[in-house]
Image: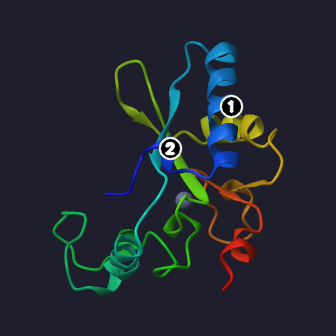
């Protein structure tokens, strides 16, 4: 399992999430609440996710092997900003008052507006290809990890 801890996040991302979350609770007290689903993810776990649609296993337990919805990422180990420590990206979801997870597009778009008040962050909802609404990353993270 990937880490869900805010303390495994790059400080700029931890600040942006914490501030946006606090504002969200003030502005939308009855709406589903955002929470961190993933911060740091090891290279080994990244590779396992990448391999899902081609590993001849039923990864999601639906009785099908390597079907379309086992595809979750284009990134191999080391190619995702989640694979660096502290993590250069985080993923979120929302939880309603009954404890159920909520993935409505509207929540992500509204929360992104709050997160993006902190400069230097890119939202996956603005990606040109493979839109990834739960995902936020440090803009230009590739340059930070260049060897
Ligand atoms: Zn992500």
Q: Which mark is residue 127?
A: none
Determine crowd level at label 1: few under 14, some 14-19, many 20+ residues with C-alpha closer than 10 A: many
| Residue at image coords 64%, 62% | 131
Asked which secondary structure carries label 2, the reply is helix
Per the model, the C-alpha gap separating discs 2 and 1 is 16 Å
Determine crowd level at label 2: few under 14, some 14-19, many 20+ residues with C-alpha closer than 10 A: few
x then y, percent, for residue 116: 78, 43
User: Which residue has dot 2 on it?
Assistant: 7
Q: Tag 1 or tag 2, which sits nearer the N-term? A: 2
x then y, percent, for residue 113: 77, 38
* Marks 2 and 1 in Cβ contact (< 8 Å): no
Looking at this view, is 16 or 34 the one in front? 16
Q: Quadrant of the N terminus?
A: bottom left
User: Which residue has dot 1 on it?
Assistant: 20
In the rendered view, does 124 fall on the left or right side of 58? right
Vertical arrangement, residue 64 with respect to residue 133, above or below: below
Which quadrant holds residue 31? top right
Ligand number 1: quarter of image: bottom right
Vertical arrangement, residue 110 with respect to residue 12, above or below: above
Looking at this view, is 88 or 93 the one in front? 88
Asked which secondary structure carries label 1, the reply is helix
x then y, percent, for residue 36: 48, 42
Which quadrant holds residue 115? top right
| Residue at image coords 82%, 38% | 117
């Amino acid at each position: 399992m990937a880490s869900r801890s805010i303390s495994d996040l790059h400080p700029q991302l931890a600040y942006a999430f914490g501030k946006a979350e606090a504002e969200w609770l003030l502005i939308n007290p009855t709406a589903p609440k955002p929470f961190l689903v993933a911060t740091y993810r090891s290279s080994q776990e990244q590779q396992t996710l990448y391999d899902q649609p081609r590993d001849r296993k039923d990864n999601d337990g639906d009785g099908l092997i390597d079907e379309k919805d086992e595809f979750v990422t284009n990134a191999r180990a080391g190619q995702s900003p989640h694979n660096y420590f502290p993590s250069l990206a985080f993923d979120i979801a929302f939880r309603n008052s009954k404890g159920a997870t909520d993935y409505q597009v509207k929540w992500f778009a509204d929360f992104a507006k709050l997160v993006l008040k902190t400069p230097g962050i890119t939202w996956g909802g603005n990606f040109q290809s493979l839109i990834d609404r739960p995902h936020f990353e440090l803009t230009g993270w590739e340059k930070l990890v260049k060897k």
